[in-house]
């Protein structure tokens, strides 16, 4: 069964994103929210890790929550291409679309 | 008069720690203390331009901090290595701050009478 992984912590301050990406399986999805959206900005080590994992894991979908981007002043142009921006409505659709959700605290 | 250094190491809006520390710095500045606010590690994200905190029901500290600095009530410092690790430069910041190297930042902390962090 595909899993929706939800990551909240900044990748620069906590190892949650790395621990998550070490364990994702084909068909899973990752949602970056709160401080974890900082991982999606181009030109950083966490962003490179996201891109690498997206290339390695077949069918892995990476999402980033729009209100958290807006709050932090991160424009769409700053993001790596591997991530898709979702708004609050799409977030709900995403959450109900996966039978299991795994939060990475 | 004591030399206060407030150390902000957390990103904006994920927690209220940065904002609360900035508010404490503003209070100290208003009470005629020597106040420096040091932004390092994820704390540099507090200063990023273009923030729209209302999107998550939060508030930014950049405006009040900039006013404090302009009035000469506090000095703002940001660490160059922390910016570089996050693909940020001084041009990405909404507030004029003095950029220090990590070694210079350590010296600043070493000269403090009181260090406050959150």
Image: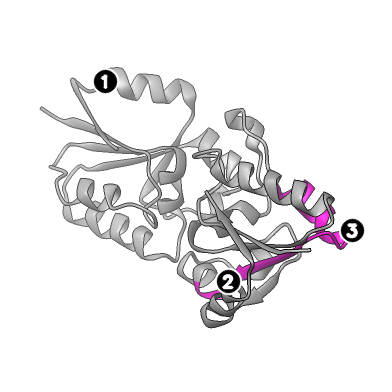
Q: Residue at x 45, y 69 (%)?
A: B85
Q: Residue at x 51, y 67 (%)?
A: B87
Q: Which residue is mark 1?
A: A97
Q: Relative to A89, does residue A13 appear above or below in the rendering?
A: below
State the CA–CA distance, disc 1 to disc 2: 50 Å
Question: Which image quadrant for residue A62?
Answer: top left
Circle nearer the viewer, 1 or 2 = 2
Left or right for B101, reference B91: left
Residue B91, x across and y down, in percent: 68, 67
Q: Which residue is mark 2?
A: B109
- Give the numbered dot on residue B71: 3
Circle nearer the viewer, 1 or 3 = 3
Residue stretch rendered in magenta on the structure:
B61-81
Q: Residue at x 45, y 44 (%)?
A: A35
Residue A96, x across and y down, in percent: 29, 17
- Tell me whether circle 1 and circle 2 mark residues in contact (CB < 8 Å): no
């Amino acid at each position: 069964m595909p899993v929706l992984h939800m990551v909240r912590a900044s990748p620069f301050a906590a190892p949650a994103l790395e621990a998550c990406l070490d364990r994702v399986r084909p068909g899973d999805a990752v949602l970056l929210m709160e401080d974890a959206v900082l991982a999606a900005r181009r030109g950083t080590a966490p962003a490179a890790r996201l891109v690498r994992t997206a290339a390695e894991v077949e069918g892995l979908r990476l999402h980033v929550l729009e209100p958290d981007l807006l709050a932090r002043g991160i424009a769409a142009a700053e993001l790596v291409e591997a991530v898709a921006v979702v708004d609050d409505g799409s977030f709900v659709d995403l959450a109900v679309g996966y039978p299991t959700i795994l939060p990475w605290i | 008069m004591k030399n206060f250094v407030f150390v902000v190491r957390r990103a904006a809006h994920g927690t209220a720690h940065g904002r609360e520390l900035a508010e404490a710095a503003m209070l100290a500045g208003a009470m005629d203390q020597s106040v420096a606010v040091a932004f390092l590690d994820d704390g540099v994200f507090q200063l990023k331009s273009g923030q729209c905190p209302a999107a998550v029901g939060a508030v930014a500290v950049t405006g009040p901090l900039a006013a404090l600095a302009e009035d000469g009530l506090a000095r703002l410092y940001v660490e160059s290595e922390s910016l570089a690790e996050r693909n940020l430069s001084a041009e990405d910041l909404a507030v004029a701050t003095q950029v220090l190297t990590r070694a210079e930042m350590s010296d600043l902390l070493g000269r403090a009478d009181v260090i406050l962090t959150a």
